[in-house]
Each structure stands twice: as structure tokens, then as C-alpha cells.
């Protein structure tokens, strides 16, 4: 093998190594993340509990969510894969390391309770059906099929939705329906949300909000 070919091969290997390194998530520091999260407090609160605003803009609970999931959402907003006009300026303020740090910080906060789970009994019963068993007559898969036992999340792809604010869950399901959000694998959520009525969305959001989060 000539020296030219050796150099070329080394270059390819080094390039592959750099690409692999870029694909590896940065390790976040919760201590640094607390400082970087200063701009998040106004909407997501100091404890990461968020806000439920019926009929208005609701802010999700971040406390206790998976760090890699949180980081992915911020990167997706920056890249335009997830529409969020309100969040975009704040996401763009963060570099990759700050995203890892902020995500680590919120993931280590204790999960808080949700608002919006005080619906009528019949509504909650429908929400429980959709969340735990689905509705096969309408080709609606249960939430727990992807979000795991207790809907408490599975890895970095399927977040914990138990104990999340009802208003935020409703907002996101409508976003999936309308194509304003499409940053999930194989459009799973979009396909499911499009089969749900407004009443179903309100019901499942209310029931999930009435359930305990992981740390409660």
C-alpha cells in the first residue's frame, strides 16, 4: 500500500471518528444548567413545574423529564424540526453544551403535580380508556403502548406524560393533528392524533394530568 493510500485511509478513519464523536450527546452538568436556566424560570417556574393556562398558552413541566429527551426538543426547535415561535428565541440562545447542562438540571429536579385533571367522571373514564387501552374501533393506540407503564416515559423518544399539565398535552395533540409538530419517529403521534376528536384529546389530557408523575 502506498503512503498516499495510507494517508487517505487515515483521513477517512479520522473523519468517521469525528462524525461519531459529534453524534455522541454531550455530558451535561446540573450545576452549570441551573445558571443557564435563568431565562426559563419566567414560564417554566423555578421548580420546573410549568403552568397550566386553560384556553391559553400552557407551559410544560420540565422537572423530572428525561435529559436526552429535553435536549432533543431544544435541538429540534433550533433546527426547525419542531415549531415553537415562543421558545425558538430562547432555544437559540443556548449552545450545545448549555443545552446538555439545562437538560441535566431539569431532569434532576423532583417532578411536581399537574393541573387540569379535575374533569367530570365520564370524561376521565374516557381518558383512562384511551391512555391505557386505546380505542381499536377508531384505530387509536393506547398511550402506554409507547410511553410505557404508567405513561411514565421510555428513554429519550417517548417522554413521561403522566403528571403533565392538561393544557400542554392538549396543545401538543392539536399540533400533531395540524402538522405543526412532526419531530417523532415515523409520524406515530401525528397518525394517532388525527384519529382523535377534540373531546378525546380533552379527555386523555385531563386523565393524564390527574395521574402521578414518577417522583410523586
Image: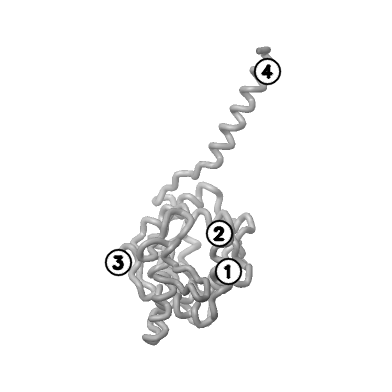
State which quarter of the image contains the N terminus: top right
In 3D space, how far apart are the residues under numbered discs 4 and 3 (Cα atoms)? 60 Å
Q: In this rendering, is residue 106 above or below 120?
A: above
Disc 2 secondary structure class? loop
**Circle 3 sits on which residue?**
216
Disc 3 secondary structure class? loop
In 3D space, how far apart are the residues under numbered discs 2 and 1 (Cα atoms)? 10 Å
Disc 4 secondary structure class? helix
In 3D space, how far apart are the residues under numbered discs 4 and 1 (Cα atoms)? 50 Å
Q: Position of residue 77 (x, y in %)?
A: 59, 59
In 3D space, how far apart are the residues under numbered discs 4 and 2 (Cα atoms)? 42 Å
The reply to whether residue 150 is in sight is: yes
Q: In this rendering, is residue 200 above or below 6?
A: below
Answer whether labels 4 and 3 touch (C-beta < 8 Å). Answer: no
Answer whether labels 2 and 1 touch (C-beta < 8 Å). Answer: yes
Earlier in the chain: of badge 4 and badge 2, it is 4
Earlier in the chain: of badge 4 and badge 3, it is 4
**Circle 1 sits on which residue?**
176
Q: In this rendering, is residue 29 above or below 91?
A: above
Q: Position of residue 139 (x, y in %)?
A: 52, 71
Mark sitting on residue 5? 4
**Mark 2 residue crowding within 10 angstroms, few (<14) / some (14–19) / many (20+):** some
Most foreground residue, 134 or 43: 134
In 3D space, how far apart are the residues under numbered discs 3 and 2 (Cα atoms)? 27 Å
Mark sitting on residue 198? none
Q: In this rendering, is residue 184 above or below 9?
A: below
The reply to whether residue 43 is in sight is: no
Q: Position of residue 72 (x, y in %)?
A: 52, 54
Most foreground residue, 15 or 86: 15
Earlier in the chain: of badge 3 and badge 2, it is 2
**Circle 2 sits on which residue?**
184
Disc 1 secondary structure class? helix
Amino acid at each position: 500500500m502506498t503512503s498516499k493510500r495510507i494517508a487517505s485511509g487515515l483521513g477517512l478513519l479520522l473523519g468517521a471518528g469525528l462524525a461519531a464523536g459529534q453524534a455522541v450527546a454531550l455530558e451535561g452538568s446540573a450545576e452549570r444548567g441551573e445558571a443557564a436556566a435563568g431565562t426559563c424560570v419566567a414560564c417554566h417556574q423555578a421548580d420546573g413545574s410549568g403552568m397550566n393556562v386553560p384556553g391559553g398558552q400552557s407551559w410544560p413541566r420540565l422537572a423530572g423529564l428525561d435529559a436526552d429527551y429535553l435536549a432533543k426538543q431544544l435541538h429540534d426547535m433550533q433546527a426547525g424540526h419542531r415549531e415553537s415561535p415562543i421558545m425558538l428565541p430562547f432555544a437559540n440562545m443556548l449552545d450545545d453544551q448549555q443545552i446538555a447542562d439545562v437538560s441535566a438540571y431539569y431532569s434532576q429536579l423532583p417532578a411536581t403535580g399537574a393541573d387540569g385533571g379535575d374533569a367530570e367522571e365520564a370524561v376521565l373514564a374516557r381518558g383512562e380508556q384511551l391512555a391505557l387501552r386505546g380505542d381499536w374501533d377508531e384505530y387509536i393506540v393506547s398511550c402506554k403502548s409507547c410511553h410505557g407503564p404508567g405513561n411514565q416515559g421510555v428513554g429519550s423518544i417517548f417522554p413521561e406524560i403522566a403528571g403533565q399539565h392538561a393544557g400542554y398535552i392538549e396543545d401538543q395533540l392539536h399540533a400533531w393533528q395540524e402538522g405543526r409538530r412532526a419531530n417523532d419517529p415515523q409520524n406515530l403521534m401525528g397518525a394517532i392524533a388525527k384519529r382523535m376528536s377534540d373531546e378525546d384529546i380533552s379527555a386523555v389530557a385531563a386523565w393524564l394530568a390527574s395521574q402521578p408523575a414518577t417522583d410523586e
